[in-house]
Image (spheres, rainbow, N blue to C red):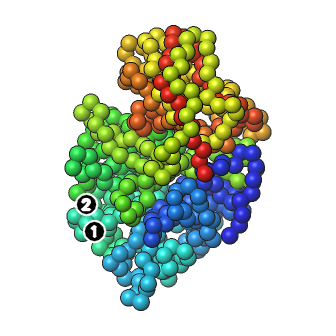
Amino acid sequence: MRPLTSDSYRPKFHFTPPFGWLNDPNGLVCINDEYHLFYQYHPFDTVWGPMHWGHAVSKDLLNWIHMPVALKPDRFGACFSGSAVIDWKNSSGFFDKQNTHPGVVAFYTANFQPKDGSAWIQSQHVAVSRDGGKSWSKEKNSLVLENPGLLDFRDPKVFRHDESEAWIMVVSEGQDIGIYRSIDMQNWKKSSVFGATAGAHDDSALECPDLFPLTFENKTYWVLVAGVQHCGPTGGTGTQYFVGAFDGYQFVNENSDESVLWLDHGRDFYAAQSWSDVADGRRIAIAWMSNNLYADSIPTSHWRGAMSVPRELELTNIEGRLRLVSKLPHQWLDAQPSDLESNVLLSEGNTLQLSSDFQVGITRFSLSLSVGSDIEYYPFGNDAICYTFSRSESGLTVTTKRNVLDQNGSSKYEIHFAYESELKLPARELMDLLHVSDACSSEMQLLDGLYSFTNLVFCPEPLSPRLACTKGSVSVAESRFQRVT
């Protein structure tokens, strides 16, 4: 195991690789109350290359221990994204009765690149762990699902569907998500497809699907998550979701095909995946905190790529429609955070500093905006990123403006990193805001987690976070801060 290197942008509590390149989270599984995080990893360079599966474990989703690389490229190709599950009843036949640890099966895409330069060939393979996820081996014949003749055929997410007594695999098939069934994890039969006419699409494949159940008011619904590569909510990559029903064979979307629901409205939340086999049944997800527009050119030194903070996903009813809400895991939230300023009225031209200097951690505050008022929130104390909240009779407009302050990235970074976006929200008399600051990131949740904004921020000299009222008046009902350790 290698120690972490350090530089000014390495996050204090977001997961990063010890060295090299990181992108999609893979193989998320909970084994013996320990969270396993695998991820797309190039251990020899800080740009994308031959994909391995990096590996880390955690007891609390906060403090991670780096493990040896789990999967490496072989004659079938590089090890692209996938998933992992516990085979509780040995339906795969991979494990013997003498095995004292839970048998774990990982599914991944082998991406084979022919030497003649022709198109890659993608197929689905397995690896197994007989020691509770610590070490991994590939079966002699690891191939479980051949390519049916598609250019894009990748990112298998596998889970158990007890109601139909089968294992289910959802896999990217270009503009569709293919749904497959198996009794033994080795022989798979296609049952349906979903997605070609629903939600957001661009000229590239949907990626990194996930499908899982959530309960709302004693009824089970199913959520299907998929990534888009070029038409995200603020440009580039993005993660959308669908809510509906699943019977073990087919997913049925309860919304219209034209409806587009984003899991995050920032620019740096992609390839979201959820953990399987969490003992208490919570649905916890994490995502790659970057964007393909500039991921290989951000100004970090020994590493590139970080994970978002984990999120607990729940359903809520908004005007008769079910929507996802994202919340920090309960173990992250201190029951007694430090109080900051409370009951402060800001009028036009007034500024409130929320602390004496920049600190990484979680800030929560409640704002009451009068109609016609604008307030700006600077988490890093300067123009690195600014969120503006504008209240009108019809609702609340949130404007995100991010700038390039560190000029040490490449031209691609300088061209694409700065952006401005606008999102209209329903009006509320009191707005609760939760913000997570780390060395190179800003993650904000509004309206009890109904709207999330994840953004990388590269600010060489962060200052004290502040609120500035630029129009009308705003009441800061309360504000609290807690360090994350």
Position of residue 219 in the picture relative to residue 36 (left or right): left
Dot 2 corresponds to which residue?
Answer: 248
Q: Estimate how packed mark 2 is, as few (under 14), some (14 to 19) or many (20 or more) residues with alpha carbons within 10 Å.
A: some
Disc 2 residue type? Gly
State the residue in front, 111 or 295.
295
Instruction: Identify the residue shown where x is 28% and y is 56%.
Output: 192
Residue 66 located left or right of residue 335 = right
The tag earlier along the polypeptide, 2 or 1, is 1
Tag 2 near tag 1, CB within 8 Å: yes
Q: Position of residue 125 (x, y in %)?
A: 47, 70
Location of mark 1 (residue):
166
Specify the quadrant of the image occupied by residue 404: top right
SS label for mark 1: strand
> Which residue is at 42% across, 38% downward?
449
Number of marks in picture: 2
| Quadrant that contains the N terminus | bottom right
Q: Nearest the camera: 45 or 99?
A: 99
From what the image shows, is residue 179 above or below residue 100?
A: above
Seen as rendered, the residue at the extreme right is: 408
Q: Position of residue 326 (x, y in %)?
A: 42, 43
Residue 430 vs 275, above or below: the answer is above
Closest to the observer: 66 or 413? 66
Res. 202 visible in picture: no
Residue at x-position 41% and y-position 24%: 430
Q: Amino acid at mark 1?
A: Ala
Residue 111 at what x, y percent from top left?
Answer: 54, 64
Residue 478 placement (x, y as % from top left): 50, 28
Left or right relative to 292: residue 2: right
- Using the image, determine if residue 408 lies above or below residue 10: above
